[in-house]
Amino acid sequence: MNNGRKDVGTGILRNWRLIKTVSGFVVTVSVLLFGCGCEEDTEIPVLATTSVTTWHIPPIQSHLPGPRSVTVAANDDLVVLDNGGRILVYNSTGKVERTWMMPEFDVGRPEGTVVLKDGRIVVCDTHYHRIVVFDSTGNVLQMFGSHGEAPGQFIYPVAVARDDDDLLFIGEYGGNDRIQVFTADGTLLRQFGGFGTAPGEFQRPSGVAWHEGNVFVADAINNRVQEFTDAGAFVRIITAPDAGLQFPYDLAIAPDGSIFVVEYGAGRITQMTQQGKILTRFGSTGRGREQMVTPWGIAVDSKGRLRVADTGNRRLIAIEPAHEG
């Protein structure tokens, strides 16, 4: 699948199948994942940067995990989930301040986290079908959710964002793909979306961001970004037909209102306006300093600096864009 683009190259080819039993029948989605990024669109500017540095992930005994999710906290600290089942808190310069483990992680590791105004850390405990809320030092304060498709239940919760009132917008996948909206204490308010390819539907809504009354969703397997009101009304698909996103796994809103999307399949970052105009791109698949392998998460801090979970390379990448003026 090349979406009409010339830049897919040969690269890494994977056959990804999402199989889910829904009401007695099987839905199968097969996609080809190319990870070369060999021929970039020359007409799209490369993101100008003043620095690109690597933040290391501490090992767990003899195992070196990879980061999955990143979110910005107070003072531009960074909260990271890794695929060892661990939460890590970095300061704004990349020093690890503290770490702790999820309550359980044998079944699978979490994806998706956000920090509330009072410092509580909300984690999508994906494979345990629930949300876990920690205090800033790692004590479990609350859990809510259970396995199922009813309102307030989850199959695989994978993404979470908050608004200015700390309402939680939680995305899930697994055949009942939707966004559910909760208060910070876990009370369900509403839900929107559904599994599918039509406008307003999702196949793995793996990134969610709230901005000034609107919700932006990285609809990963449908290779697009969608916009909704925070009441749940579908607004539009904002990605242009020639955007060529390759598995957009996460997104974040910059201080100037632009959207940074991290692409799992292309090993790169795409910056676009909220109207879908592509502004810049950065990176390609590989092991170099400005390359990524299957990146899963992205965050933007108060100064517009990017923090990327370069999962396949088992590292974080800190990018400082060059600002005009």
Image (cartoon, rainbow, N blue to C red):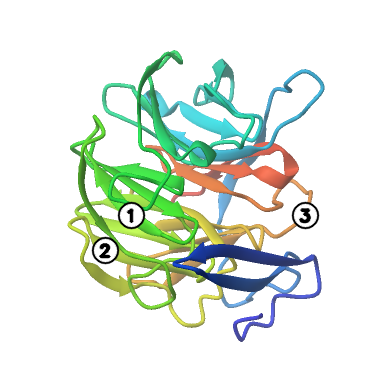
Label 1 belongs to which residue? 179
Q: Where in the figure is residue 173, as x and y percent of width and height?
A: 47, 55
Pick whichever, 130 or 52, lies toward us. Answer: 130
Please state which amino acid type lies under the numbered disc 3: Gly
Identify the residue position indicated by label 3 in the image. Answer: 286
Regarding mark 1 in the picture, which secondary structure is present there? Answer: strand
Mark earlier in primary sequence (1, 2): 1
Q: Residue 228 carries which label?
A: 2
CA distance separating discs 1 and 3: 33 Å
Would you say the residues marked 1 and 3 are in contact, meaning their CB atoms lie under 8 Å apart?
A: no
Relative to the observer, which residue lies in front, 111 or 270?
A: 111
At label 2, which amino acid type do we have? Phe
- Up the image or down, 81 lies above or below 287; here it is above
Q: Earlier in the sequence, mark 2 or mark 3?
A: 2
User: Tag 2's secondary structure?
Assistant: strand
Q: In this view, does 6 lie above or below 268?
A: below
Image-quadrant location for residue 12: bottom right
Which residue shows up at 74% across the image and 23% down it? 59
Residue closer to the observer: 226 or 318:
226
- Marks counted in the figure total 3
Mark 1–mark 2 CB contact (< 8 Å): yes
The answer to whether residue 229 is above or below residue 311 is below
